C-alpha cells in the first residue's frame, strides 16, 4: 500500500497533469467492507504519518512566508487543516467513490493475509523513519551509490513500474503545489493568474520527477529490506491484477484529493495571514 508523497517546493514549483480518474457509477462499498479495507491497509496509521509530515512542512512555510510569526491564528488554522476527523473523511470519501463497483474480495484476501499485513507494517515503519531527514538522506545515498543488491533493485524497479508510482507520485505532488499557489495567489504579495502558476510549476517538472524516482527507490528498498524476493514478487503479482490496479488508483485518488484540499487551504492561510500582518 504505497503512500502518496506530496512535497512543497517553495515558489519554484512544478505541476503535471494528474492521471484521468474514471468514476464508476455503481453502488458505493458497504460500510462493513470499507471498514475492513481501512483496517487492513492501516489507514489510520498512514494518515497519522501524513499529518506529521504536513505539520512539519507548515513550520517551513511559516518560516519562509511569515518570518516565523504565524501566531495563534495560524496555529489554529493549521490544526483545522490537519484535523484527524477531516482527513479521515476526505480520504474515505475519495477512496470509496473510486472503488465503487470494484471487486474488493481479492484486495481483502491479499492485505488481510500474513504477508499483506507484514507489508503494510513495513511500509508504515519506513515512512515513519523517513520523518527523520538524516534517515531519508542515508537511504537516498545508498541508492545513489548503487549499494543495493542488483536483483533486489530490479524487483523494486519492477514494483514501481507496475504501479505507475513515479507518474502517480510526481503528478500528485506537483498538483498539490498548484493548489498551494492558487491559495497563495489570493495575497496581493503573490498575485498570479492560472497561466503564470502553470508556468512556474512546469519549470521544475524534470527535477521533481528525478527526485521522486530517487525517493521511491530509497523508501521502498528500506521498507522491503526484511522481505524475501519471493515476497516482493508476490506483491508485484497482486499489483498487476485488476484488483491491485483498482486499489492503487483509488488510494492515489483519495490521497490526491485530500492533499489538494489541504494545500489550497494552506496557501490561503498564508494569504490571509499576510493580509493581516505588516511584514
Image (cartoon, rainbow, N blue to C red):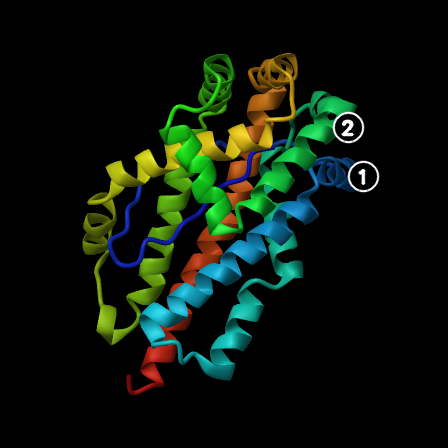
Element under disc 2: loop
Element under disc 1: helix
Q: Quadrant of residue 275?
A: bottom left
Q: Is residue 138 left or right of residue 102?
A: left
Instruction: Give the answer, above or below, for where 166 lies relative to 156.
Output: below
Query: Which residue is at 71% across, 36% downward?
Result: 29
Instruction: Give the answer, above or below, for where 129 lies relative to 265.
Output: above
Of 100 and 53, the residue lying toward us: 53
Count of numbered labels shown in the rendering: 2
Q: Is residue 47 left or right of residue 160?
A: right
- In the rendering, at what x and y percent does residue 170 appear? 38, 38
- In the rendering, at what x and y percent does residue 139 appear? 47, 36
Q: Which mark is residue 112?
A: 2
Query: Which residue is at 69% across, 23% downward?
Result: 103
- In the rendering, at what x and y percent does residue 76 appear? 55, 76
Q: Which mark is residue 32?
A: 1
Q: Is residue 198 left or right of residue 1?
A: left
Indicate which disc, 1 or 2, sits on the residue closer to the N terminus. Answer: 1
Q: Quadrant of residue 214?
A: top left
Instruction: Give the answer, above or below, for where 225 lies relative to 127.
Output: above
Amino acid at each position: 500500500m504505497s503512500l502518496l508523497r506530496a512535497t512543497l517546493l517553495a515558489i519554484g514549483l512544478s505541476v503535471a497533469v494528474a492521471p484521468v480518474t474514471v468514476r464508476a457509477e455503481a453502488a458505493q462499498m458497504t460500510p462493513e467492507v470499507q471498514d475492513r479495507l481501512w483496517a487492513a491497509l492501516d489507514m489510520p496509521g498512514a494518515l497519522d504519518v501524513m499529518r506529521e509530515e504536513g505539520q512539519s512542512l507548515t513550520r517551513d512555510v511559516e518560516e519562509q512566508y511569515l518570518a516565523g510569526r504565524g501566531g495563534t491564528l495560524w496555529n489554529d488554522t493549521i490544526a483545522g487543516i490537519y484535523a484527524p476527523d477531516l482527513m479521515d473523511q476526505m480520504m474515505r470519501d475519495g477512496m470509496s467513490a473510486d472503488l465503487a463497483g470494484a471487486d474488493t474480495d481479492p484486495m481483502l484476501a491479499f492485505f488481510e493475509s500474513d504477508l499483506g499485513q507484514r507489508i503494510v507494517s513495513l511500509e508504515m515503519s519506513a515512512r515513519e523513519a523517513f520523518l527523520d531527514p538524516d534517515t531519508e538522506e542515508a537511504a537516498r545515498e545508498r541508492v545513489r551509490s548503487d549499494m543495493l543488491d542488483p536483483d533486489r533493485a530490479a524487483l523494486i524497479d519492477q514494483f514501481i513500474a507496475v504501479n505507475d508510482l513515479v507518474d502517480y507520485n510526481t503528478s500528485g505532488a506537483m498538483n498539490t503545489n498548484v493548489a498551494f499557489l492558487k491559495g497563495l495567489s489570493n495575497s496581493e504579495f503573490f498575485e498570479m493568474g492560472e497561466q503564470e502558476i502553470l508556468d512556474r510549476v512546469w519549470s521544475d517538472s524534470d527535477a521533481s520527477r528525478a527526485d521522486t524516482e530517487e525517493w521511491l527507490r530509497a523508501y521502498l528498498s528500506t521498507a522491503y529490506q526484511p522481505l524475501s524476493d519471493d515476497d516482493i514478487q508476490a506483491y508485484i503479482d497482486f499489483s498487476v491484477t485488476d484488483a491491485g490496479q483498482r486499489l492503487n488508483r483509488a488510494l492515489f485518488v483519495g490521497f490526491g484529493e485530500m492533499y489538494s484540499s489541504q494545500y489550497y487551504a494552506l496557501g490561503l492561510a498564508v494569504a490571509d495571514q499576510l493580509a493581516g500582518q505588516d511584514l
